[in-house]
Amino acid sequence: MKRKFLLYEISWPEAKKYFSENKIAILPVGSTEQHGPHNPLGTDHLIAKAIAEKVAEKTEVICLPVIPFGISGHHRQFWGTIWVKPETLRNYVRDVCLSLKYYGVEKIIVVNGHGGNISALVELAREVRKEGIFMVVFQWWVLAGKLFPEMFNREERGHAGAEETSLNLALYPHLVDMEKAVDEKPSWLIKEVEGLNLPLDTIDYTKSGVFGISKTASKEKGEKILEAIINKLVEIVEWLKRATPEELASKDLADLFI
Ligand SMILES: [Zn+2]
């Protein structure tokens, strides 16, 4: 049976009906990159897709196919990682947004599954707002850290760590091999200093591709996080549905307020 909230499952007359009545859409974006020896390369886009599609179902907002490639050059030494340049991602997502705008969409929720994509997506969101599209960018792990501060510690929240692995266990257990899970303390080549950004790749820190602890992952924890994330994102979508064009529009030049 067709799921009417998935753009790739409906026909063009069905899309016409949706876009004539709704100005909002959900776009999952992720990456295809190493996630340690125990997680699939698709982790970031698979998680984004699952969250986005669940939220779409609950809110009756159309969901686009997931964009599976992102800014992952810093993982390239691990086989199978595919990466695109920041400007490529920005341009690609911009074109997707402009296609949606052609059908009247003015509000887009980007469910982003990969930390490396954040700056490019946020930059783009500012840009397209000037063209009449209000795009919000959502990261599940940031919210998970706020909602469940006690569930995982800092070492378990790293790349391919227990938190991310737990979501995979909840969503795609057949793709996770916990027997291959490793705990690896990242080595700091240069002393970590507050305010300093280093041009290092993942391989400079870890041999396995795991940042920290992954063995404490569990399906139950993943399910708990997912449920809470989805509920919160449903609230965000409902808020965005209600927001008026005036509230979201890019503002005019400032004038003296006195
Ligand atoms: Zn990831």
Image (spheres, grey):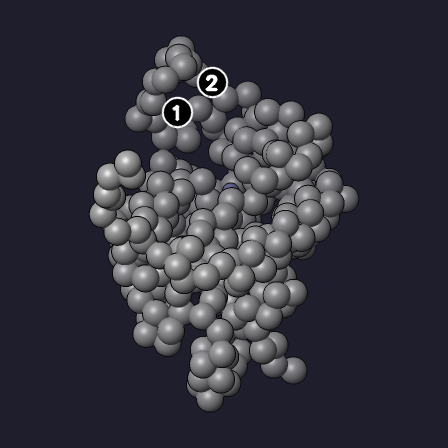
Foreground: 66 or 132?
Answer: 132
Residue for badge 1: 204
Foreground: 33 or 191?
Answer: 191
How many residues crowd mark 2 within 10 Å: few (<14), some (14–19), many (20+)?
few
Element marked by disc 1? helix
Residue 78, position in %: x, y? 42, 39
- In the image, is residue 124 above or below residue 92? above
Could you tell me the amino acid type at mark 1?
A: Asp
- Can residue 145 be seen? yes
How many residues crowd mark 1 within 10 Å: few (<14), some (14–19), many (20+)?
some
Examine the image and state in which quarter residue 46 appears: bottom right
Q: Are marks 2 and 1 in contact (CB under 8 Å)?
A: yes
- Can residue 11 be seen? no
Rendered image: mark on residue 187: 2
CA distance separating discs 2 and 1:
8 Å
Rendered image: mark on residue 45: none
Foreground: 112 or 241?
Answer: 241
